Image (cartoon, rainbow, N blue to C red):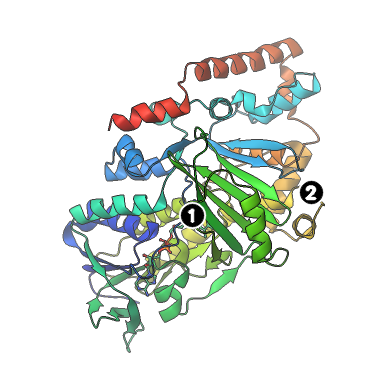
Amino acid sequence: MESEKIRRVVIAGGGTAGWMTAAALGKLIGKNLEITLVESDAIGTVGVGEATIPTLHVFHQLLGLKESEVMAATNATFKLGINFENWRVPGEDYLHSFGFLGKDCWACGFQHFWLKGLQRGIDYQIGDYCREHLAAREQRFAVLPDQDRNHAYHLDATLYAKFLRKFAESHGVRRVEGKIGNVKLSPSNGFIEALQLDSGMTIEGDLFIDCTGFRSLLIEGALHTGYDDWTHWLPCDRAMAVQTESTGSPVPFTRAIAHESGWQWRIPLQTRVGNGLVYCSRYLDDEGARELLLENIEGELLNEPRIIPFRTGTRRKHWNKNCVAVGLSSGFIEPMESTSIHLIQRNIVRLMQLFPSSGIVQPDIDEYNSQAMEEMEHIRDFIILHYHVTERTDSKFWRYCRSMQIPDSLAHRIQMFKESGVIFKLPQELFGESSWMQVMFGQGLMPQRYHPIVDLMGDEELATFLGNIRRNVRHQVENMPDHRQFIDHYCKSK
Ligand code: FAD
């Protein structure tokens, strides 16, 4: 399969995915391209997707965006992790923070030292050995030097798309408003030739980026690429979202509160809070979801609760012929660990790395698809862990999650951790050892033994080692300002 030189890029859709793609292509490789983005104001965007992970500032750095400016424009707060409430058992919580726990040695991870400490009665929470963990708990924050940054943002998705639109247009991206009514394919090779708008306008292109969200007009509607359904592992299939006024200072973490048939998010922005319930329609109907959500929010409603149906899974190919799916059109895992915007960013970077300037060839497509799939599967396993490893038996939903079959790759990790406390990170994997560790302990997994190398350290030496790390973490956090005060000052400095 080969195509002509790529000169005209057409982005279908202008949500977070569309405008992130337009901003990056426009700024970084747009000089020799003609980039057009089509979006429909009448259709609008999904309007959620407000919690991010630390990789986003790499994207902003690539674009040359100033952090304080992005934050001021998007009503953003800082995020140091996610607090999981009621996940192992009702009434208990744990924090998955973005920081690193303790210190590893060449042979084993920090959890082995902590485990031995626990056996010797040094009973501190594992999070006490992590700067971001403690800072989140104490609601403190400071921007640290680049190599030490483990923070993300909570931001207003609509304002973020607007901000990126302005940026992309200033780098030559042309925006067309209108509804795509038809996708015209080439009769010879099945490639997309043009988008036909209801207005009668036709937009021709060489490469098409499908950012039409769950509608997936190009990659599925026109090219019938297929979808691998993951609902047997990730059974939630609906969300209900609503915004409320802030009732206090924003915390520097997302709250993920488990309920009987799903979980609820609370995402604090500077002046409002994004709330939503993710639930499984097999066990909870929309009326019940609405009641549950409204019972569990604080502050005045700023809009009516909105239902968003979804199907967890992945498009079988993220790049098919001359169409690349970015954003929800490429699949959706679950909002729990805020990974969708990260996957958008990864697909954009990968596309630029494999950009088919002199024509589309199959090896590029295959490489792109295999990397994209691998990343999705790693994240999928991490998310399933939260549902599957639980002691909750109080509802049909949790009983299903506990007993469901899980992917072999995840079963292997759980088994290893249970037996020997070993956690590993694969090269292309997003979540590192500290993330797996916090969630595995938080969900109630406890290894049977620690690594024997830790026994080379005597009890006293171990107590000093652990004590020093804790003191150092506490000292760093005590020197950080209050999160709210920091934001007010930082955003004014833009
Ligand atoms: P959309 O926002 O739906 O945009 C689609 C675009 O296509 C729109 O501009 C629309 O107008 C256009 N379009 C569609 N059809 C046509 C047509 N016929 N003609 C012209 N234009 C058309 N991600 C995170 O990283 N963190 C989170 O916390 C998070 N929470 C989420 C919670 C829920 C419940 C859901 C469902 C998703 C969440 N996500 C989250 C994912 C995140 O919302 C999306 O990845 C992100 O918003 C990108 O969406 P999108 O741009 O692909 O689609």
The disc labelled 1 sits on which kind of residue? Ser
Horizontal and vertical percent position of residue 242: 52, 54
Is residue 223 visible in the rendered image? The answer is: no
Q: Quadrant of the C terminus?
A: top left
Lower position in the chain sequence, tag 1 or tag 2 = 1
Ligand 1 position by quadrant: bottom left
At 56% across and 66% down in the image, what residue appears? Answer: 310
Q: Nearer the viewer, residue 152 or 349?
A: 152
Residue reaching furthest bottom? Answer: 187
The residue pinned by badge 1 equals: 340
Residue reaching furthest front? Answer: 300
Across the whole image, how many numbered discs are drawn on residues? 2
The residue pinned by badge 2 equals: 392
Horizontal and vertical percent position of residue 23: 28, 54
At 63% across and 59% down in the image, what residue appears? Answer: 290
Horizontal and vertical percent position of residue 173: 21, 60
Q: Is residue 313 left or right of residue 63?
A: right
Element at label 1: helix
371, above or below 443, in the image = below
Element at label 2: loop
Distance between the alpha carbons at the discs numbered 1 and 2: 27 Å
Q: Nearer the viewer, residue 326 or 290?
A: 290
Q: Nearer the viewer, residue 457 or 81?
A: 81
The disc labelled 2 sits on which kind of residue? Arg
At 17% across and 60% down in the image, what residue appears? Answer: 32
406, above or below 67, in the image = below
